[in-house]
Amino acid sequence: MSSQALKIVVIGGTAAGPKAAAKARRMDEHASITLIQKGAHLSMASCGFPYYVGGFFDDRNLLICTPAGTVRDPDFFEAAKRIEALVETEALSIDRAAKTVTCKHLPTGETRTIDYDKLVIAIGAAPLYPQVPGIELEGIQTLHSLGDADSLRAIRDHHQSHKAVVVGGGLIGFEVCEALRLADIQTTVIEKTDSILPFLDPELAKLVANHVLDNGADIITGNGVAAFLGEHGKLTGVKLDNGTELPCQVAVIAVGVRPRTKLAESCGLEIGAQGGIVVNDRMQTSDPDIYAAGDCVECTSLITGEKVRSPYGDLANLQGRVVGQNLIKEDSARFPGVTHTGICKIFDFTVGFTGLSAGQARELSLNDIETATISGMDIPAYMNGKLMISKMIAERETGRILGFQSVGPGDVSKRVATVAMAIRGRLTVDDLCNADLPYAPPYSLALDHVIVAAHVLENKLRGRMQGISVGEVKQRADSGADCFILDTRNPEEFEEMRLGIGETLIPLGALRERLNELPQDKDREIILFCKISLRGYEAAAILQGHGWRNVKVMEGGILAWPYPREK
C-alpha cells in the first residue's frame, strides 16, 4: 500500500457507516478504511427485526447477511472489502486538530488511537424512554438492537409472557404489536396523543385502528404511562395517567429516537435546532474533513425547505453512499433532502405516506390547501382487487402536490411511491391527472388509484365538486344539524350495510324521477354518498343541474367511514 493512501475512519457500523465505507472502497482500492462499531454486529437489517420476532422467518443470520447469504462479520469486511472492522469497540473521542479517533475495545478495555484524513460519524439514534417510575424493571425493553430482537423472539418461542403493552402508536409500535399478537400474546398499544400513526390524518388513522382491533389487539389513546409496576424487580403492569392499571409481563417502548450527538458535540461540531448533526448537501459537517450520515443528522425537507429529522434505514443508506463517494472525490455527490416517505405492514393492512398530512400542513401554517379522499380497488374486482383508502393534499393556488397517505389491504406501496416522486418533482394535480402510468388488469385499473385521487382533487380545485369528510358528516349527524343525507346505492346494498345516521335512500338511477322527495329549499345542505361516492358525485352533478346550490359529496363513501354503523 502506498504511503500516500487516504486514511478513512468510519464510526458506526449499522447502515450509513458500512455503506459509506463500502462505496469508498469501490471508488478507491488503495484507501485505508477502518470501521468502528460499538455493538457486536455489523450491517444489521434492523427494519426486519419485527418480522423475525413475528416468526415470518426463523434464521436470525438473515438479518446480517449479504444477498448471497454471507454473514457480514469482520472477516467478511476484511476479505471482501479490505476494510478493518472493529466490533465491540466504542469511539471515545475525536481530536480534530490532530485528526485522530480514540476508541476502546469493550471486552478487554484496551484503548487505541487511529489517524484519519477523512472521518465519518454514523452512530445513529438512541431510543427514547419515558421518564417515569419503574422504568428500570426487568421486562421493559425497546426493539432497537439485534439483542432486543432476540429477547422478544425468545418470549415468542418459549411462551414467556401472556400480556404485553406497547408504548407508542407509531410505525414501530404497531409492527411490534403485530409480532406479539402473532405469538398469541394479549397486546395493548398505548398512545399519549389522541390519534395513532401521527403521519396520517385522524380519519385514516381510525380505519387502521379498527383493523388492529379486529385482529385482537387493544389501543388506548389520549393516555400516557404514569408508572411501570413490578414485584421483585420484574414488570407486572403499567399504570396510566388516568389511573388505569394494565397487567403485563413485557412492555416494549416505541416512543421515538434521539440522535446520538455526544461524540460530535464533544469535538465542537455544530448541532442543529432539531437535535441532529448539521450537514450540508454533501453530508459534510461544520468540519469539512468530517462527514455524518444516518439517524444522527438533520435533513432538509424538499417540501418546506426546513430542517427536519428523518430516521429511516433507506435514507441512511442513500446518505452513506453520498458520503462514500465524496470521501474519495470531493463534491461529486449530493443528498438534496427528504419527502418523508414511509410504509409499514399492520396485519393485513398496508399503511403508507409521503409528504405532509393535512394536519401537518396546517401546523406549518400552510393553510391554503385542498384535500381529496377516495376509496377504490388497486386492480379490477375480476382480478381479486383489494381496497385502498387514500388522501391527497395539494396547494390550492398552485396545485402542487404536498402529500399523500393510503391505507388498506391493496397495493399501497406502488401508489405511495408514485406520489413520492411527484412531490420530489414538484408536480401538480394537473400533471397527475394525465400521468402515463402502466396499465394492465393484473396491476392496475385503467385509471390508476393515484390518477383518480388527482381527478377528484382537480374537481374540487376547479369548483366542480364540493366535498365533505366522513368526520364532518359524523359531526353533522351527532349534532342534529339541519342537513339532508342521501344514500344513492341500491336497496340490496342498503339492506346489507348502512350507516344509520338518518340517511334517505334514493338510488342514482331513480334520482331524476324522485327530485320532489328532496328538500325544496335549494340552499339547504344535501350530503350524498354511496359505497365509494362515485355515484354520490354523479348524483351531486344531477342536483346541481336542477338548481340545488349546497350539494356535498361524502369523500370515500361508506368504505372510508371509520365510525360505528347501523349494520
Image: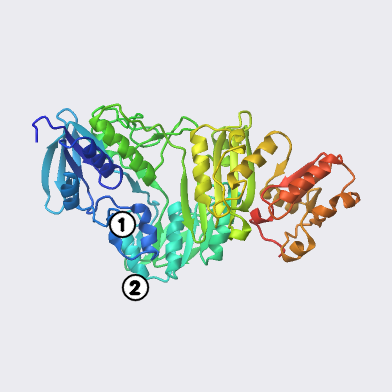
Classify 259 as above or below 474: above
For the residue pair 523 and 492, the one nearer the viewer reads as 492
Which residue is the site of mark 2? 158
Q: Residues within 10 Å of mark 1 (few under 14, many from 20)?
A: many
Residue plotted at (84% across, 51% down) = 511
Residue plotted at (59% across, 46% down) = 448
Q: Residues within 10 Å of mark 2 (few under 14, many from 20)?
A: few
- Residue type at mark 2: give it: His
Q: Secondary structure at mark 1?
A: helix
**Distance in Å between CA atoms under marks 2 and 1:** 21 Å
Classify the position of the N terminus by image quarter. top left
Q: Secondary structure at mark 2?
A: loop
Disc nearer the start of the sequence (2/1): 1
Which residue is the site of mark 1? 63
Q: Is residue 197 visible?
A: no
- Residue type at mark 1: give it: Leu
For the residue pair 554 and 488, the one nearer the viewer reads as 488
